Image (tube, rainbow, N blue to C red):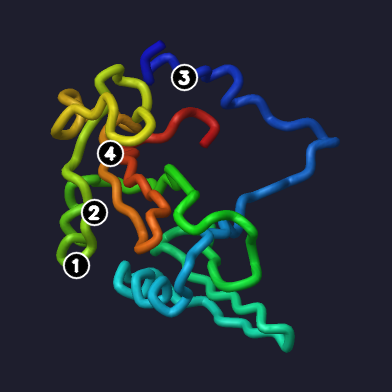
Amino acid sequence: MSTTDLSAARATELPGPDVLDMRVEVVVVPVSDVDRSRRFYEQLGWRFDTELVSDDGVRLIQFTPPGSLCSVSFGSGITSAEPGSVESLVLAVHDVEASRAALVARGIDVSEVFHDAGGVFHHTGTDGRVPGPHPERRTYASWASFEDPDGNGFLLQEITSRAPGR
């Protein structure tokens, strides 16, 4: 299957009246040092949304990437997941090379742009990465990656046109 074989029929079907509208709004990222993580997400240039502290010591901080409707939350006492255990949070960008350059200019360690050897999706870790953007600059096919201080992984994915129904 190539990325051009997207199921247009399935993507354009409208949900029936019994399907509730649902959106991913917040992703919780487990961290070991809340203040260090706050500095990192500020360095990314993401919008600071809130910091909440409860009487029982739970602390939550939330940031939102520019243009995103989904936020990232982290803190203490909000997840039992191991710090650094999140992989492959995809950030859709229109131009992966420009987005990478903007992050590097902010002091973020970002991988070189790559595409997948199989042409479909990136493999776990760095397996199957071919240097440079996809040779045809096919939408959904060029990537760059970075991690937060705990090793939670993010992927920049170049999307220049959307699949039908998106």
User: Circle 1: is it few (<14), some (14-19), or many (20+) Cα within 10 Å?
Assistant: few
Q: Secondary structure at mark 2?
A: helix
Q: Which mark is residue 116?
A: none
Q: Which mark is residue 143?
A: 4
Residue visible at 18% across and 52% down in the picture: 98
User: Which badge, 4 or 1, is on the more N-terminal residue?
Assistant: 1
Query: Where residue 92 sits in the image (x, y, percent)?
Result: 38, 46
Q: Which callout, 2 or 1, points to the residue nearer the camera?
A: 1
Residue visible at 64% across and 50% down in the picture: 23
Mark 1 — residue? Answer: 107
Residue visible at 42% across and 60% down in the picture: 67
Query: Where residue 44 sits in the image (x, y, percent)?
Result: 31, 67
Mark 3 — residue? Answer: 6
Figure check: 128 above or below 154? above
Q: Secondary structure at mark 1?
A: loop
Figure check: 88 above or below 4? below
Mark 2 — residue? Answer: 99
Residue in the foreground of this view, choosing between 86 and 121: 86
Distance (Cα) linking label 2 and label 1: 13 Å
Distance (Cα) linking label 4 and label 3: 19 Å
Q: Secondary structure at mark 4?
A: strand
Query: Where residue 106 sits in the image (x, y, percent)?
Result: 20, 69
